[in-house]
Image (cartoon, rainbow, N blue to C red):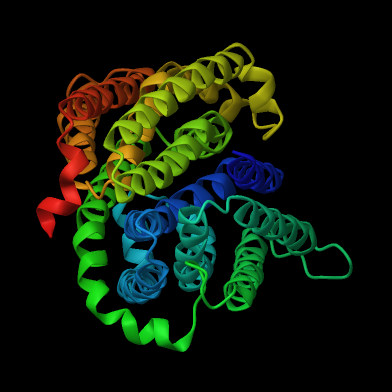
Amino acid sequence: MLSQMVISLAGLIDRAMVGRLAGDEGAAVPLAAVGFATQFFFFIQSTLFAVGLACIALMSRAIGARDPATARAAQAASIQVSLVTTVLLAGGMFIGARDLLALLGAEPAVIDTALPYLQLVLVSSLMLAVAIVIDSALRANRDMRTPMWVAIAITVVKLAGNWVLIFGNLGAPRLGVLGAGLATVLSQAIGLAIFLAVVLRQPAASPSALRRRDWRAARPLRRDVIRIAAPGIAERVIMNLAMLSYFWVLSRYGTVSVAAYTVGIALLSFSWIPGTAYAQACATLVGQSLGAGQPEIATQTGWRCAGLAVVTAVLLGGVVALARRPLAELFTQDVAVVEALGPFMLALALAQPFLQLHFTLGGAHRGAGDTWTPLVAATVGNWIFRIPLAVLFSVVLELDVVWVWNALIVDHVGRAIVMVISYQRGRWISTLERRN
């Protein structure tokens, strides 16, 4: 949770810094530019998380079965798959960046501001491809503290770089949004260097070490990584295509709505932290319990994690819902953006318990190697509920943007229902055995 909190805090401060870049059109243009570019970065990042979760599933099973050699080979195989995936996705986006931004409905001023920032964060994703897998490998071995310290280091470098490069401090040129992109590349490079130093210093017999022989042993496991990650990547593709479609709907309401969405997502990410953290812990513990032949403990762990996540979500979401205006004013002084943020933040706060529930139970499924059920849940939530409702409210009925915000709630309720039914049925327990 501390690691996720640090990352979310960095995102919030990053948005606050960008929100202070007020040109002729106020803060909306730079905020919207970062928002559009971030959608593509999230697309890549989310596919890398799918590979990282495959790494956790394979490594935690091997660790639970007391087979560290297989765990190390799974980590090496995951890094190989992650790099190839990133090169393909980031390369295509880099080449067609301007056309992709225009396709989403970004205005010309927003495209000009977003383009160099997007290209820089795409470069940083190559380093992120390796870092996410190593992060996942350490978590699979129950080492949650090292990723936390690395996240702190990345955050310090990122925010210091922002302060220097965005605003032109310490004699540096004032680069604005471009400076934020350069700070991202620098922070990811530092983070990757630390992660590589950590795994290379691990004892050779450690499940999370990496040596030359582990790369040779990775070849047979690449297929397993792809097989487990593929539904997860498909889930992320479906979700991100839905997010891009949702962004297109929002663009119909103007740049202010897009800017509000950009700030609101960063702000509400704090209340997502429990679900993300419990999901990671749940995936590790479920995988290790199944590897040790203890399915009852695995099942109990999932329910306990889900309960903790929901209770925490209610508390945090309640705070954000009640204090949404003063919180919004911390990140931008643009009155129009602040006004637009209120109903969006309320909708996200109401969706939090359901979001946390499907996050956590999704972690339990993925820890067991079942990445198909979260794919089904994401498809139902996004393409049966969120996008059709958003299009209905905006294009057909021409209702206020508040109705588009409320489509988010229905999305997360639908996903939560799918995950609860699947978890109760219990077929996820024997997923890897069925595949093997």
The residue located at (64%, 57%) in the rendering is 146
- Front-most of 277 and 367? 367
The residue located at (47%, 71%) in the rendering is 130
- Front-most of 32 and 183? 183
Judge from the rendering whether residue 95 lies leftward or rightward of residue 318; answer left or right. Answer: left
How many callouts does the rendering have? 0
Does residue 344 appear anywhere in the picture? no
Check the image and report above or below for 95 versus 294: below
Residue 125: x and y in percent read 47, 67
Residue 299: quadrant of the picture: top left
Residue 326: x and y in percent read 69, 20
Quadrant containing the N terminus is: top right
Residue 117: x and y in percent read 54, 63
Judge from the rendering whether residue 117 lies leftward or rightward of residue 164; answer left or right. Answer: left
- Front-most of 243 and 153? 153
Check the image and report above or below for 360 versus 409: below
The residue located at (24%, 21%) in the rendering is 393
Judge from the rendering whether residue 204 lies leftward or rightward of residue 55; answer left or right. Answer: right
Residue 162: quadrant of the picture: bottom right
Does residue 271 appear anywhere in the picture? yes
Residue 380: x and y in percent read 17, 32
Check the image and report above or below for 236 versus 213: above
Judge from the rendering whether residue 238 lies leftward or rightward of residue 305; answer left or right. Answer: left
Quadrant containing the C terminus is: bottom left
The residue located at (38%, 53%) in the rendering is 64
Residue at the extreme right of the image, as rendered: 170
